[in-house]
C-alpha cells in the first residue's frame, strides 16, 4: 500500500498543533487540515465516490485546496486540478477527457467568476454527476440557486477516517499540460511519482519543520503542488498562501511571517528585482529569507544576478515538467551550482541528450533532453499514440533542447517547438533573449519566429522597456547586431507595455504569435 495522503496524516500526528497554512488572518494547524480533509473524504464516500474515480478541482491558493486535494486521495480517487482561468468550453474538455465523476469548484470573485463558468461547463459534461461550490465562508449560501456547497458535503461528517489502500503505481493526480501543441493532455502521475518528487524537493531546499514558505505559485500547477505544498507538508513546515502575485504585497508578507523559503517563476523575480523597496524592509527580509527557487521557464542570468545582489539570497534554478512530477534536474547545494544552468539530475533520475535519431550527443553539443526514473508519468490519459512517441525507448522525451558542459551541468537552450529555422539555420530564442535583456533600456523580452516568404521564418522580439527609458527599433537592432551573429538578431521589434502571461507567470508565446 502507498497513498500520497500519508504526507498529511503523518505530519498531523507529528505536529498536530503546528501551523500548517496561513491565509490572511486565518491559521490552520496540521490537525485542523487533516480533520477537515477526513470530513470531505467521508462526504465523498456518501455520494458514491470510489477508488479510481476522477474528481476535478478548481480552487485558488486557499486552505480549501490542500483539504480537498488530500480528501480525494484518502478515498483512493484521482485529483484532476484545473486552472482557475479556464473558460466553460475548456472546462468541458477537461471534465470529459478525464472522465471526471465530480467537480469541486470555488465560487470565485467578481473578476474571476470560476463558479458560474465551472457550473456551465459541468452541465455540458454528461459523465460528471456531482457539482459542489466552495464558498469563501462555509456558512455562505450557494450563489447559484439549487447548487450544493462544500459545507453541505461535509455536514455532520466524522472528522476521523482512514485512507484507501492504493498501491504505489496507482494514479493519484492527472495534471493537464499547457497545450502549447494541440489540445491539453492529462499526465497520469502515481502516488510513488509524487511522493518521491516531494521528498527530493524537500531535500533540495534543505527544508526543516521550522521553515516558513510562501506559496504564490498556483497550487493547481505541478510546480507549486509538488515542490511547495507536498514537500512542505512532508517536512511539517508552515506555508503562507497567496492567491495572486503582487510584488509589494509578497514582500510585506515575507516580512510579516518571517518567510525563509520562496519559489517563483522568472517573471516574479523580475518584478521583485524592479520593485523599489524600503531599505529597512529589504534588510529584514535579507536576514530571514535563506533560499529561493526558480522554475517554470528559463531565468535570465541578468535577473538572477541582480536579484541575488539586491536580496543577498541565492536562487537555485531547476528544470521540470508535468510529465516529470515535475523535478528532473536542479542546482543542488551539495553538488554546487552554476548561474544560467538547470543543474544536474536529481536523485534517482537519469538524463541524457540525443539527436533526432535518439543517439546520444557529445558534451557541448545541443540535443533533446531525455530522462527516466521514479518521476516519469505513467503516460498521458487515454493517449496511446502520444505515449508511444513521448516514452519511446523507456525515456521521456521532453521536447527541450539542452547542452551539457564538462562538469555535468545542463543548460536549456530552448523548446524544440520554439526553435526558429531561419534560412536553414537554427536560432534559439532564449540565446537572443539573454543578450537583449542586458541592454540598459530593456526590462523584459520574448523572441519568436514569424513567417517569411524567402527564409521560412524571421526573428521577432517583443520588448518591455524599463520605466523612464526610451529607445527606438532601429537603434535597438543596431545594438543587438554588435552582440550576436548576423543570422540571429531580430529584424523586427515590437514594444509592449506588458507581455501576456499564464496563471503561473509564464510568458505566453502562443499569444504573441497570434499578434
Image (cartoon, helix red, strand yellow):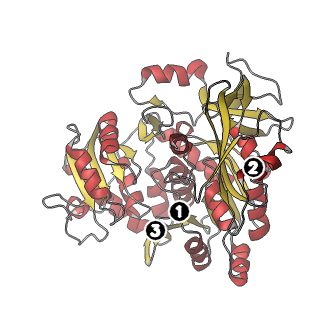
Which numbered disc, 1 or 3, marks the residue closer to the eye?
Answer: 1
Q: Position of residue 461 (x, y in %)?
A: 66, 45
Q: Which mark is residue 234?
A: none
View extreme (left): residue = 146
Where 363 falls versus 69 (above or below)?
above
Which label belongs to residue 16? 3
Quarter of image, res 412: top right
Residue drawn at (62%, 57%) of the image = 267
Q: Earlier in the sequence, mark 2 or mark 1?
A: 1
Q: Estimate the x, y position of residue 335 in percent, counting from the top left.
A: 80, 47
Q: Nearer the viewer, residue 84 or 11?
A: 84
* Residue at the image point whose x is 45% and y is 31% from the top: 182
Residue 268 point in image, percent of width and height: 61, 60
* 76, above or below 467, in the image: above
Compare residues 80 and 334 and report the one nearer the observer: 80
Residue drawn 66% across the image and 71% down it: 275
Circle nearer the viewer, 2 or 1: 2
Measure the alpha-carbon separation of dots 1 and 3. 25 Å
Q: Residues within 10 Å of mark 2 (few under 14, many from 20)?
A: few
Secondary structure of the residue carrying tag 1 is loop
**Residue visible at 67% across and 19% down?**
356
Instruction: Name which of mark 3 and mark 2 comes first in the sequence.
Output: 3
Position of the N terminus, as image quadrant, is top left
- Give the image quarter of residue 148: bottom left
Would residue 336 be seen by someone viewing this image from the given angle? no
Residue 17 locus on image (x, y percent): 47, 72
Task: Look at the picture and state if 515 lies above or below 424.
Answer: below
**Horizontal relation, residue 105 to residue 398: left or right:** left
Q: Which residue is mark 2?
A: 474
Viewer-proximal residue, 236 or 204? 204
* Crowd tier of the residue under label 1, counting other residues whose Cα lies within 10 Å: few below 14, some 14–19, many 20 or above: many
Q: Which residue is mark 1?
A: 216
Amino acid at each position: 500500500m502507498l497513498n500520497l495522503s500519508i504526507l498529511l496524516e503523518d505530519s498531523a500526528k507529528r505536529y498536530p498543533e503546528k501551523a500548517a497554512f496561513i491565509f490572511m488572518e486565518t491559521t490552520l494547524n496540521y490537525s485542523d487540515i487533516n480533520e477537515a480533509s477526513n470530513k470531505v473524504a467521508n462526504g465523498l464516500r456518501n455520494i458514491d465516490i470510489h477508488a479510481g474515480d476522477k474528481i476535478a478541482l478548481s480552487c485558488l491558493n486557499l486552505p480549501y485546496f490542500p483539504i480537498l486535494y488530500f480528501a480525494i486521495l484518502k478515498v483512493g480517487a484521482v485529483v484532476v486540478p484545473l486552472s482557475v482561468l479556464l473558460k466553460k468550453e475548456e472546462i468541458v474538455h477537461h471534465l470529459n477527457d478525464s472522465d471526471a465523476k465530480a467537480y469541486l469548484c470555488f465560487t470565485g470573485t467578481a473578476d474571476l467568476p470560476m463558479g458560474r463558468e465551472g457550473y456551465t461547463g459541468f452541465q455540458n459534461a454528461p459523465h460528471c454527476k456531482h457539482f459542489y461550490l466552495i464558498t469563501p465562508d462555509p456558512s455562505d449560501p450557494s450563489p447559484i440557486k439549487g447548487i450544493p456547497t462544500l459545507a453541505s458535503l461535509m455536514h455532520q461528517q466524522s472528522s476521523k477516517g482512514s485512507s484507501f489502500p492504493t498501491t504505489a503505481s496507482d494514479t493519484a493526480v492527472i495534471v493537464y499540460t499547457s497545450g502549447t501543441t494541440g489540445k491539453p493532455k492529462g499526465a497520469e502521475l502515481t502516488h510513488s511519482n509524487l511522493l518521491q518528487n516531494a521528498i527530493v524537493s524537500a531535500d533540495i531546499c534543505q527544508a526543516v519543520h521550522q521553515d516558513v514558505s510562501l506559496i504564490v505559485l498556483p497550487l493547481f500547477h505541478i510546480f507549486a503542488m509538488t515542490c511547495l505544498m507536498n514537500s512542505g507538508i512532508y517536512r511539517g513546515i508552515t506555508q503562507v498562501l497567496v492567491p495572486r502575485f503582487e510584488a509589494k504585497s509578497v514582500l510585506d508578507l515575507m516580512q510579516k511571517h518571517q518567510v525563509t523559503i520562496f519559489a517563483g517563476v522568472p517573471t516574479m523575480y523580475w518584478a521583485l528585482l524592479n520593485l523599489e523597496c524600503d531599505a529597512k524592509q529589504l534588510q529584514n527580509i535579507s536576514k530571514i529569507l535563506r533560499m529561493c527557487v526558480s522554475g517554470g521557464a528559463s531565468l535570465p542570468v541578468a535577473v538572477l544576478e541582480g536579484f541575488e545582489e539586491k536580496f543577498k539570497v541565492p536562487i537555485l534554478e531547476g528544470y521540470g515538467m508535468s510529465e516529470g512530477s515535475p523535478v528532473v534536474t536542479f542546482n543542488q547545494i551539495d553538488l554546487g551550482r552554476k548561474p544560467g544552468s538547470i543543474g544536474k539530475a536529481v536523485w534517482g533520475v537519469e538524463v541524457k541528450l540525443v539527436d533526432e535519431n535518439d543517439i546520444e550527443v557529445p558534451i557541448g553539443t545541443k540535443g533533446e533532453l531525455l530522462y527516466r526514473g521514479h518521476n516519469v508519468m505513467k503516460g498521458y490519459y487515454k493517449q496511446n499514440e502520444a505515449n508511444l512517441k513521448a516514452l519511446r525507448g523507456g525515456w521521456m522525451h521532453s521536447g527541450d533542447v539542452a547542452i551539457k558542459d564538462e562538469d555535468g551541468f545542463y543548460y536549456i537552450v530552448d523548446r524544440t517547438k520554439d526553435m526558429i529555422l531561419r534560412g536553414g539555420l537554427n536560432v534559439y530564442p532564449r540565446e537572443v533573449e539573454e543578450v537583449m535583456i542586458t541592454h540598459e533600456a530593456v526590462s523584459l523580452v520574448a523572441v519568436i519566429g514569424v513567417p517569411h516568404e524567402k527564409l521560412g521564418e524571421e526573428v521577432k522580439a517583443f520588448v518591455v522597456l524599463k520605466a523612464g527609458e526610451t529607445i527606438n527599433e532601429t537603434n535597438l537592432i543596431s545594438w543587438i547586431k554588435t552582440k550576436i551573429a548576423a543570422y540571429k538578431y531580430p529584424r523586427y521589434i515590437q514594444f509592449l507595455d506588458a507581455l501576456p502571461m499564464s496563471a503561473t507567470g509564464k510568458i505566453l508565446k502562443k499569444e504573441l504569435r497570434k499578434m
